[in-house]
Image: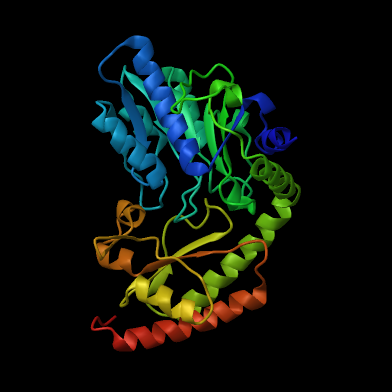
Amino acid sequence: MARRQVAAAIGCQPREIVFVSGGTEADNLALFGTVRQALHQTGRASRHVVTTVIEHPAVLNACAQLEREGVAVTYVPVGADGIVDPDEIRRALRPDTVLVSVMHANNELGTVQPVAEIAAIAREAGVYLHVDGVQALGKIPVDVDALGADLYSMSGHKIYAPKGIGALYVRRGTRLGAIQFGGHHERERRPGTENVPGAAAFGCAAELAGASLEADARRIGELRDRLESAILERISHTGVNGNRAARTPNTANMYFDGLEGEALVIALDLRGFAVSSGAACSSGAVEPSHVLTAIGLRAERARASIRFSLGRANTAEQVDALVEAVAASVAHLRKLSPVTV
């Protein structure tokens, strides 16, 4: 039942769904499974993968491991709008390219990539296309046939299922080798005892998300626009990062010049609001988001940016309260900041 529900959510056959532990495992299975299978079949010492500079770490770090294994990887840039040009993908292809991996919707900006156009380019070249759809499922319509994806990653908790369950769509006929070894589960594509309660919850969540997708997208998009418009009107020296049109309805990424995004995250947390800076901490130093620097933001502005993510339970009253909290927090932090704006 769960397999049929998840399959229905993306327009595929139930047998094409592989249940895994989440989006990270789905991405890893897609990349390592296709590339290592190609290496095994051809016996060549190296092959080639094309991806973009704004992918989730689950893809970027998998690509880094592939490079350590002798696989060549091309990281295609994106524009200031956070969207990749399909022609850049075309130019990156080589005769030994095995896989193109492009996310459907970016996790920090919400920008939606031109997957169908990229799929046509990959298909013409005889190359598999993997799409990280973790941030797209349940937020925008997903039809893997229309998109042309050969592999599509999903995560249950992004659509209100429990953490620890996800799925990978594998188009029938796609050559995918196992990256774990054990029993014969999931048609020998992913060994190990299945997380049956998680899969059941994922299936129910997928069915519910599909039933309310249009209404949820419209209402949440209106809340996001309400949030952005109020912040832009009330707070100076701020703006929206990325393309404001081609994106998921739930995500707003904004910069607030003259302060540190991490400080604003903490200030809003103390006021009861959970937001994210989108930055990673390494060795005690906060590094600017790789996504924001990839779209051309200087390090200072990238560090001054935070991401707001809205969901099914949020209300206009909560958004208005958040705007008040942001305005007060920004005013306070700018007074303390040594940087003038």
Give the image location of residue 323, x and y in percent.
53, 79
Q: Quadrant of residue 180?
A: top left
User: At 54% across and 34% down in the image, what residue appears?
Assistant: 152
Residue 148 to residue 125: above or below = below
Residue at 28% in and 83% down? 337
Colour basis: rainbow
> Which of the two residues, 181 or 40, is positioned nearer the viewer here?
181
Q: Quadrant of the C terminus?
A: bottom left
Q: Quadrant of residue 281?
A: bottom left
Q: Out of 86 and 184, give the one closest to the viewer.
A: 184
Residue most toward the top? 42
**Residue at image coords 68%, 39%:** 9
Instruction: Tell me if residue 200 comes above or below residue 69 in the rendering.
Output: below
Regarding residue 55, the answer to whether it shows in the image is no
Q: Quadrant of the N terminus?
A: top right
| Residue 317 lies in quadrant | bottom right
262 over 99 or under it: above or below: below
Classify residue 127 as left or right of residue 214.
left
Q: Is any part of residue 101 visible from this angle?
A: yes
Please give the count of numbered marks on the rendered protein: 0
Q: Position of residue 252 (x, y in %)?
A: 50, 63
Q: Where in the figure is residue 242, as x and y percent of width and height? A: 42, 56
Please provide percent x and percent y for residue 315: 67, 71
Using the image, determine if residue 218 lies above or below residue 167. Answer: below
Return the residue nearer the eye: 310 or 280: 280
Is 180 left or right of 249, judged from the image as shown?
Answer: left
